[in-house]
Image (tube, grey):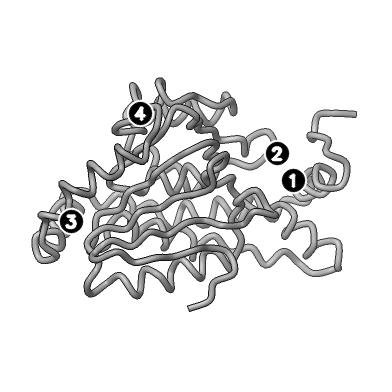
C-alpha cells in the first residue's frame, strides 16, 4: 500500500512501522493515525512483533499544530478528535503482538504516548522525552493513562508540570526506557533475535492475561478523551497555537 505519513516493511513475522513526515517534524495528524490503524489491521493474524521507529533526530513530536492552524485560519472548526489516537495506543498496548518503540532523538507529547503504550522501549544516546502541552494551556490527557501505567503517577506528574525534556539515562532510571546503547540498531536486533522464539498463540494468551489483570487504560478512556476535547476547544489555547505557528512565539511572550 502507498502511505503518505509512514513507511512500512515486513520482515518475516516482524513489521517495521516508521513515522515519516519529514516536512512536519514527525508530528501526528489524522492521516498518520489512520494509516497506523491500517497497518495494525494487517498485523492481526500473522505478525508477532511491531517495531515503531522515527527519523534519526526525531521519533515523534506530538500534535500537528500546523494542521490545526490550517483548519482554523480557513474558517473551519477544528476537527480534532482524540479518540482514534487513544484507540491506536490501546491497540499497541493490548494487541496480539509485541510492540517495540525504537527511539532516536526527540519524543514529545503524543510521541511519548506511542512510547508509553509499547511493550518494550529501546533507545540510543540521543533520545529525549518531554511533555510540552502545559506551555500552551493544554495537558497530555490521553498520554497520561499510558504513562502513569508505565512509570507511576508522580514521575508522570513531574514530567507534565515541568514541561522540560529528560534524557535517556533518566528515562531508563524511571522505567520509561527498558534498554539503551550508544548505537541502538544492534540492541534492536538482539531483542528481535530473542523475540522470534515466541509463538503468536503464546503472545495472544499472555497479553490477554496481563491486560485482564489491569483494565485501567479502558477505564480512563472516556475521561481522557473528554479532557482532551475540552482543552483543544478552549479559544485562548487555540489562539496561542495560532500565534506560535505564525510568529514562533509562546503564549507568555509579548
> Residue 171 in the image: x percent, y percent?
40, 27
Number of the front mark, 1 or 3: 3
Along the viewing direction, whichever of 14 and 175 lies nearer the viewer:
14
Categorize mark 1 by other alpha carbons within 10 Å: few (<14), some (14-19), many (20+): some
- Look at the numbered disc 3 and give the secondary structure of its residue: helix
Q: Residue 199 sits in which quadrant?
A: bottom left
Left-right relation of 139 to 79: left
> Residue 53 in the image: x percent, y percent?
44, 50
Along the viewing direction, whichever of 138 and 6 lies nearer the viewer:
6
Closer to the chain start, of discs 4 and 2, is 2
- Look at the numbered disc 2 and give the secondary structure of its residue: helix
> Residue 28 in the image: x percent, y percent?
58, 56
Q: Residue at x 43, y 31 (%)?
A: 156
Closer to the chain start, of discs 2 and 3, is 2
Q: CA distance from mark 4 to mark 3?
A: 27 Å
Q: CA distance from mark 1 to mark 3?
A: 38 Å
Closer to the chain start, of discs 1 and 3, is 3
Number of the front mark, 1 or 4: 4
| Residue beneath disc 4 | 181
| Residue beneath disc 1 | 237
Q: CA distance from mark 1 to mark 2?
A: 6 Å
Q: CA distance from mark 2 to mark 3?
A: 36 Å
Number of the front mark, 4 or 2: 4
| Residue beneath disc 2 | 136
Q: CA distance from mark 4 to mark 2?
A: 33 Å
Amino acid at each position: 500500500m502507498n502511505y503518505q505519513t509512514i513507511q512500512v516493511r515486513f520482515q518475516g513475522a516482524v513489521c517495521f512501522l516508521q513515522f515519516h513526515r519529514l516536512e512536519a517534524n514527525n508530528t501526528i495528524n489524522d492521516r498518520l493515525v489512520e494509516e497506523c490503524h491500517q497497518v495494525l489491521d494487517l498485523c492481526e493474524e500473522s505478525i508477532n512483533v511491531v517495531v515503531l521507529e522515527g527519523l534519526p533526530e526525531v521519533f515523534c513530536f506530538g500534535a500537528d499544530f500546523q494542521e490545526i492552524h490550517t483548519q482554523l485560519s480557513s474558517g473551519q472548526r477544528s476537527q480534532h478528535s482524540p479518540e482514534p489516537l487513544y484507540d491506536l495506543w490501546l491497540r499497541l498496548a493490548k494487541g496480539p503482538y509485541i510492540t517495540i518503540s525504537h527511539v532516536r532523538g526527540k519524543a514529545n507529547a503524543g510521541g511519548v504516548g506511542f512510547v508509553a503504550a509499547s511493550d518494550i522501549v529501546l533507545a540510543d544516546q540521543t533520545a529525549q522525552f518531554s511533555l510540552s502541552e502545559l506551555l500552551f494551556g493544554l495537558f497530555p490527557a490521553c498520554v497520561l493513562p499510558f504513562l502513569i501505567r508505565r512509570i507511576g503517577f508522580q514521575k508522570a506528574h513531574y514530567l507534565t508540570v515541568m514541561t522540560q525534556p529528560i534524557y535517556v539515562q533518566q528515562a531508563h532510571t524511571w522505567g520509561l526506557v527498558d534498554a539503551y546503547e550508544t548505537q541502538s540498531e544492534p540492541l534492536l536486533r538482539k531483542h528481535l533475535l530473542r523475540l522470534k522464539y515466541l509463538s503468536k498463540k503464546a503472545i495472544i494468551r499472555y497479553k490477554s492475561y496481563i491486560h485482564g489483570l489491569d483494565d485501567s487504560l479502558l477505564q480512563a478512556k472516556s475521561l481522557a478523551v473528554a479532557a482532551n476535547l475540552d482543552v483543544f476547544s478552549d479559544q485562548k489555547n487555540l489562539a496561542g497555537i495560532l500565534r506560535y505557528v505564525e510568529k514562533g512565539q509562546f503564549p507568555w511572550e509579548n
